[in-house]
Image (cartoon, grey):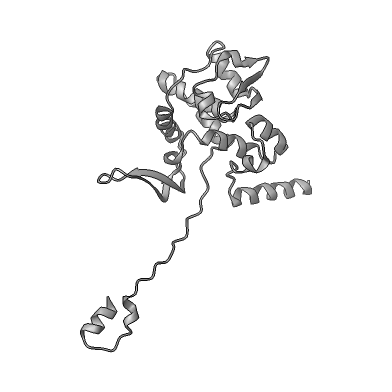
Amino acid sequence: FFCQRAESDNLSINKQYKERIFVKTEETEYKQPYLNEQEIKSIFNLDLSHDKEMDNVRDNLVIGMWTSLRVSDFLTRLNVSNIDDGFIKIRTMKTKTLVNIPIHPQVEQILKKRNGNLPGKISEQKFNKKIKILAMLCGIDEEMVGGISIVDEKTKIKRKVIGLYKKYLLISSHVCRRSFTTNLIGKIPNKVICDIGGWKKEDMMLHYVQQTNMESALVLKKHWENQKQ
């Protein structure tokens, strides 16, 4: 703009200003959302006795987060025949891996509440919508950097927009495997997490760990404080 104005006033200007220079923008780095144990507990304890549909969604979500199963398994294929003597035994749909998963106390309570039955099956699309509402009802609304897919009204093209959003808006079915892995990393051997989640290689499992740098720093701080005692 200033160069053009200077040129219009017959001032001497380097003509190279007319050359376009394209600078590649750096991708914004951000962590994918996961739910910590306290957040899972708040969802588990949420009173939904007045809303059977949301209660059903909540129970499916809790099962997903404490089994590490993919949504294609826990939301559509898992049934009571897969439960045996305190374990869930199922061959995963994606990798055809046979996994044995001990039943978490919260999952045990869900089964007890439902007289040994699992919650009803729903579509992944509906599940993704409802779990955002669940997280919102539990006050999981801290702001964090993330990406939301938005469809352009004119072109109808879907694109991911990176920005600062309430955490509940960023939650989808992928939160289940991320939460399971992130909450257990460092507490039990990595091999155990891999075997439960059906990962062939450790680096595949570590891809799901979404612990922030500060959360890691707090873990080390707590470790050092315990050493003083």
Q: Quadrant of residue 168?
A: top left
Can you give x and y, in whole percent of width and height, for residue 162 in the image? 42, 51
Which residue is at 58% across, 19% downward? Answer: 109
The reply, left or right, for residue 215 in relation to residue 132 is right
Residue 78, compared with residue 7, is above or below; it is above
Which residue is at 64% across, 31% downward? Answer: 198
Can you give x and y, in whole percent of width and height, for residue 169 in the image? 42, 40
Can you give x and y, in whole percent of width and height, for residue 76 in the image? 49, 22
Q: Tell me, yes or no, if residue 188 can be seen here.
A: no
Q: Tell me, yes or no, if residue 70 can be seen here.
A: yes
The reply, left or right, for residue 188 in relation to residue 115 is right
- Count the numbered circles shown: 0
Q: Quadrant of residue 106?
A: top right
- On the rendered image, what quadrant is the N terminus found in? bottom left
Residue 204, compared with residue 64, is above or below; it is below
Which residue is at 45% across, 47% downward? Answer: 146
Nearer to us in this view, 185 or 18: 18
Can you give x and y, in whole percent of width and height, for residue 207 in the image? 59, 43
Nearer to us in this view, 52 or 45: 52
| Residue at the farthest top position | 115
Nearer to us in this view, 222 or 71: 71
